[in-house]
Structures are given as structure tokens and as C-alpha cells.
Amino acid sequence: MEKIDILVVGAGFAGLRALYKFRSIGYKVQVIEASPDIGGVWYHNGYPGARCDVESYDYSYSFSPELEQEWRWSERYATQPEILRYINHVAERFDLRKDIQFNTRMTQAKYDEMTAQWVVRTESGQVFQSRFLMMCVGQLSAPKTPQYPGLESFKGEVIHSGKWPKRKVEYAGKRVAIIGTGSSGMQMTPVIANEAAHLTVFQRTPNYSIPAANAPVSDEEDSWVKANYRERRERAWNSPTGLGFMPNKTSALDVTPEEREKAYEASWNRLGFGFALTYYDILLNKQANDTAAEFIRKKIAGLVNDPVLREKLTPKDHPFASRRPSVDSGYFQAFNRDNVELADVREFPILEFTSEGIRTQNKHHLFDMIIFATGFDVFTGSLFKPEIVGRHGMTLKNKWADGPVTHLGIGVSDFPNMFIVVGPGSPSLLSNVLVSTEEQIDWMANLVQSMKQQNAVEMEVDPQAEKTWGQHINDRVKETLYLSTDSYYNGAEVAGKPRVFMPYSGGVRGYRRILQQCASEGYSGFRFYPSPAALTRSEDLAKA
Ligand code: NAP
């Protein structure tokens, strides 16, 4: 049995950052990673056209000014291969690989209450013993494949965007299907359309999208950002989304239609996600939202030639950004090509897969390759894959049977000495997740240091604090339009999942202040124990 201080599960951006941080303050850290290499979602999502829709300079670590200065991003929005090169550079530069064990899938983590240790078992039968368990398993890492009748009978290739094969996938000259029009489907569509003989995109819900306006990074721009990097980071940390954009303080409804049009136009080809902050109330007020949604609909109308297609591709059934919009590079324009077809599954549902393709209610579509861009079991999918057992045999799955409960998205009562990074209850997917990741890990490290100073061996969330935080999450989201539609934010992406709003919508800046206040109050809502609480209880009982 290997004894360590911090067992980190997952070697994506979060796991590597946790390793770096805790190792640098003197803890023995072991990272275990189910995949053969580092990168997490960026290791697996190698589909054509995959790139980040947060600007490269912001979707990068801020902990090392040297790293910031030496890394040269080539494009405003980095491609998946470039991001993976960056992650590998970081791993080499800070000698991280030596503490990562690959091809190691955790099957169970069980908390031993008497010794205050996590006992972690892996698929191969290895056992680790660790004081802290740190879950860095990502929110978008449990791919979801709808189970259609006949799926197994299809003779061609079937691929999920979130488990893209490492070999070269040959789609040139082939008849290809993409199912799903979230960010992944929208990103790959124009790229695959360029080379496939025929591409059919199966759409259930039309999605809003903002043009990426991607461009190479010039030397001047690179020098400018590097000369001002601290200020840029400060802006990101203190902005609602962690993207550095401050919302316009004006309401979309307090200006003339002409002014509004001008403002939207100015944001459109420049800001990516920042478009949603053109006015502060776009996500707070339906009428304000309608003005932004209508602007996007007009833009789509200008991009798609065929009126019937245009109608089908236009999102109308939910407010803009109440579900995750995309940032695209030529998605709508791809439908003007002769080799691209839209299959609207609301109009003609998929009945079955056949050996040759997909049969919908109106047609038998023939394919050589079918790509599922159908997303993930978001937030909880990867946390529920292993069995996590806390006090009194309580499993995380049972604890969260009605939806996740946490204190600050960081800890869970009954699961002492366990941290969850950018999971439910934190800004997570409503933020630039790199900003939230670094913020949380540094804060957790301070908490662990504080425990050390107080000679505490065990930390556990107070159930009352958990209730208060859950209430706060609900109060904040009620101020927004997020609850007005089904989305993966509220568990609608998987049938039978509890319908609970999972991320924290109060913003990165607000969350940061809450974390700071919690720390200044001696980590309010977290109880520290000088010896295992269960041991003390059993000794007390014995004495009595
Ligand atoms: P997603 O946003 O969840 O989209 C899944 C798509 O598949 C949706 O269009 C969904 O339709 C459709 N779908 C699911 N089940 C279906 C079914 N049974 N039949 C027909 N259609 C079905 O997944 P994603 O595109 O992989 O993106 C997930 C998240 O990953 C993004 O929101 C983003 O946070 C992140 N991401 C980021 C980037 C980036 O940074 N550039 C790129 C890719 C992904 P409905 O909408 O009707 O459910």
C-alpha cells in the first residue's frame, strides 16, 4: 500500500495544477490517470476543428510568470493539438510526469474513519492510502451515446467526439453523419464538410453561435499581452465569467434600437462569448435577451441561403445563452454547400441504425461513418464512475441522489478530506474554467496549510453550510434565465437525472469574494478535527 498526502484523480488541467501546487508546498502527491497520457478532455477531444472558445492567453495557467512569457500562442483561439502541446510543455517544464501514474483507473475510494485516510483502489488491484482525495475528473469527461435500436449492426465506423481515436480518422471522400449540434458538432461540421463526399448533420435543437473571429497572433499582439499580463489576469479574476469582460452597465432596454444594433454589431465579430455581456441584463431579463437573440437570428439569416434550411437552423425555443452557445468558424455557411444536408430529428426522428446507415421517419440515410457529437453526462458523470464511499458507508451517488450538495462546490459533508475541483456548486462551466480551477486549488492548498497549523487531521463540511450554499445557488440562479429551458446545467441532458441547477451562477468575481470571506472566517462551514472524529467518538463511548 502506497502512502501519500494528496491523491489526485485525473491529469488534465486541474490535476496537473493540483500536483504542481501541493508538491510546491511540500506534500507528497500522487496523480492517477485512467488514460495513457496527460491532457484530460484535451487528450480525448481530438476531433477535426476542435479548439478552445476561450482566448488562448486566458485559457492558460497564471501561476508562473516565466511560463506566461515563454509560451507563444499561435492563434487567438488555440486548436486542440496546440493546447495539448502547451499542457505537455507545462508537464516537462515543472517535471510533473514523475508523479503521474497513467493507465490507472480508480474504481473505489473509501474513507477509513478511524485513521482519517482514503483507501483508493484501481482497476488493476493497486491500493493507495492518502490523507486527502482530490477529484480532478472534469465535468465533460463521461461521453454520452444515445442507444438507438440496431446501433451494433452498422458496418461503418462509429466515433464519439469525446473519445476521438488517436489514429488518423479518414473521412475524406466518405459519407459522414454528425449527430448533435452543440459546440463539438458545430466546430467539426465545416471542417468535415470540406473533405467528406457527403455530410448529414442530425439536429435536435438549433443552437446559437457567435463567430470566433479567430486569427493568428501577431508578434506585436504577443508582446503587448506579455507586457501587460498581470493586468489581464486581474481583469479575468475580477470579471463575472473569468474571461475579462466587464458587462456594460446599461440595460439592453434603455437604449434605442439603433444604438443597440450598433453595440451588438461592434461585439459580434470581435468578442466571442463577450457578446453575451454587450448589456448586463441579457441573461437576466427575457425582453433584453430577445434583442440579442433576434440580432443573432438575423445574422444566421444572412449566412444561410436556403430559406427552409435557414428556418430550421434558427434557434427560437430558448433564450440566448440559457444553454451553452457555441463560438464557431463557418458552421452556418457550411449548409450552403451541395454536399451538406440537415436532418431535423424533431421533424423526422431517428428510428434505428441499420447496417448501412440511419433510418429516420422519412428516409434511409446511407453512411460510411457516424460521429456522435451528443455530449456528456455533465458534472456528475465522471464523479459517479468510481465508487466513492464516505462516512457510515455513504456513497457519493447516494448522497447526491437528488442532485449535488456541496459547501462552495468544494467539499461534501460525510466525505471528510475530499475536495472536488470545478465541480457542481462552483462557477465551473459558467466560467473560464482555467480561472476557476486555479482559484479553487490555491484556496484548497491554503485550507490544508491552515489545518496543518492547527494540527488538524480531518476536515469535514458542516451539513448546515451545505444547505445554506445550496439555497444561495438557487437564489442566484432565480435571478437569471438559466431555469427557463432544459440544459445540461440543470440535468436535462440525461434521462432520469435529478433536475437541479448545478453550477454557481453568481460569477467568478463574486465566488472569489465568498471564498476569501470563508477563509478569513477560519474556513467557515468546514470543521477541523485534531484527531479522527469517529475515533474520538468511539473513545468517548468507551469511556462512558
Ligand atoms: P452538448 O453541448 O451537450 O451537445 C450535444 C448535442 O447532441 C446537442 O445538440 C444535443 O441536442 C445532441 N443530442 C444529444 N442526444 C441526442 C439524441 N439522442 N438525438 C439527437 N441529438 C442528440 O455537447 P458538446 O457539443 O460535446 O459540448 C459539450 C460542452 O463541451 C460544451 O457546451 C462546452 O462547454 C464544451 N466544449 C467546448 C469547446 C470549446 O471550448 N471550443 C468545444 C467543444 C465542447 P439537444 O440540444 O437537443 O440536447
Image (spheres, grey):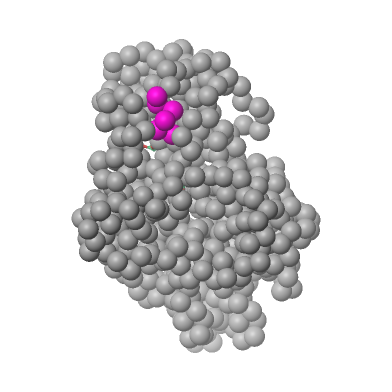
Q: Residue at x 71, y 74 (%)?
A: 25
Q: Residue at x 67, y 60 (%)?
A: 223
Quadrant of the image containing the N terminus: bottom right
**Per the image, is 333 magenta?**
yes
Q: Position of residue 24 (x, y in %)?
A: 73, 70
Q: Position of residue 39 (x, y in %)?
A: 64, 48
Ligand 1 in which quarter: top left
The residue nearer to you, when weighing 269 against 450, is 269
Asked if residue 295 shows in the view, the reply is: yes
Instruction: Establish if 518 lies above or below 479.
Output: below
Asked if residue 105 shows in the view, the reply is: no
Instruction: Establish if 300 lies above or below 405.
Output: above
Q: Position of residue 425 (x, y in %)?
A: 42, 63
The residue nearer to you, when weighing 294 against 446, is 294
State whether the magenta stretch is mostly helix, strand or loop.
helix
Q: Residue at x 25, y 53 (%)?
A: 258
Instruction: Establish if 354 lies above or below 313.
Output: above
**Per the image, is 215 magenta?**
no
Instruction: Establish if 89 lies above or below 412.
Output: above
Q: Is 232 left, or right, of 98 in this rendering?
A: left
Q: Is 351 left, or right, of 19 in this rendering?
A: left
Q: How many marks on residues?
A: 0
Residue 29 image-quadrant placement: bottom right
Chain part drawn in magenta: 331-336
Q: Is 3 left, or right, of 360 in this rendering?
A: right
Q: Residue at x 72, y 68 (%)?
A: 23
Residue 345 image-quadrant placement: top left
Q: Position of residue 304 (x, y in %)?
A: 35, 30
